[in-house]
Image: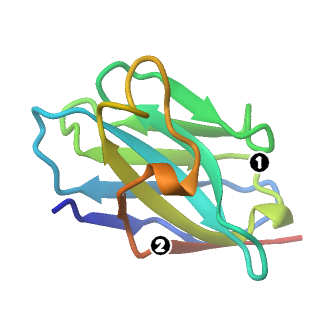
Amino acid sequence: QVQLVESGGGSVQAGGSLRLSCVASVDTYRRYCVGWFRQAPGKEREAVAAIYTGGGTTFYADSVKDRFTISQEYTAKNILYLRMNSLKPEDTAMYYCAAVATGGACGTWYTPRLVHEYDYWGQGTQVTVSS
């Protein structure tokens, strides 16, 4: 069973930055895809970014390209980050970390970006951006 714990959320003003962290209890010799999703009140959960830990293949939603960066801790491969710059009020949401083991819809050929493509989820961390 994979457990995911997010942290780093908070309240910032528009234009500010935050870095979210996701610590995954995974076997470090295995490869996973890890995604960051967000869900605002009354809206569906949507993918923000994803990465394949075996090769660095990434995905970004158009709404966050050039502002958000997903990365993997160099020494501890089970820690994933989402660096968020130039935050906007519309980025306000609960942010979730999700993971799925390599194979099928996860690998160098594809980084999953749909909710049903992930098997494991964290509890979320709130990000609030004020104007």
Q: Nearer the viewer, mark 1 or mark 2?
A: 2
Amino acid type, residue under disc 1 in the picture: Ser
Classify mark 1: residues with Cα within 10 Å, few (<14), some (14-19) or many (20+). Answer: some
Q: Which mark is residue 100?
A: none
Residue 4: where, in percent of width, then height? 30, 63
Quadrant assignment, res 122 = bottom left
The disc, 1 or 2, on the residue closer to the chain's N-terminal end is 1
Residue 6: where, in percent of width, then height? 39, 65
Residue 41 visible in rendering: yes
The residue tagged 1 is 86
Image-based side of 127 in relation to 28, left or right = right
Above or below for 33 versus 114: above
Quadrant assignment, res 62 = top right
Image-based side of 59 in relation to 120, left or right = right
> Which residue shows up at 23% across the image and 32% down it?
31
Residue 78: where, in percent of width, then height? 23, 45
Q: Nearer the viewer, residue 118 or 26?
A: 118
Q: Are marks 1 and 2 in contact (CB under 8 Å)?
A: no
The residue tagged 2 is 124
> Which residue shows up at 40% across the image and 18% down it?
108
Q: Secondary structure at mark 2?
A: loop
> Which residue shows up at 55% across the image and 45% down it?
83
- Disc 1 to disc 2, C-alpha distance: 21 Å
Q: Secondary structure at mark 1?
A: loop
Image-based side of 126 in relation to 118, left or right = right
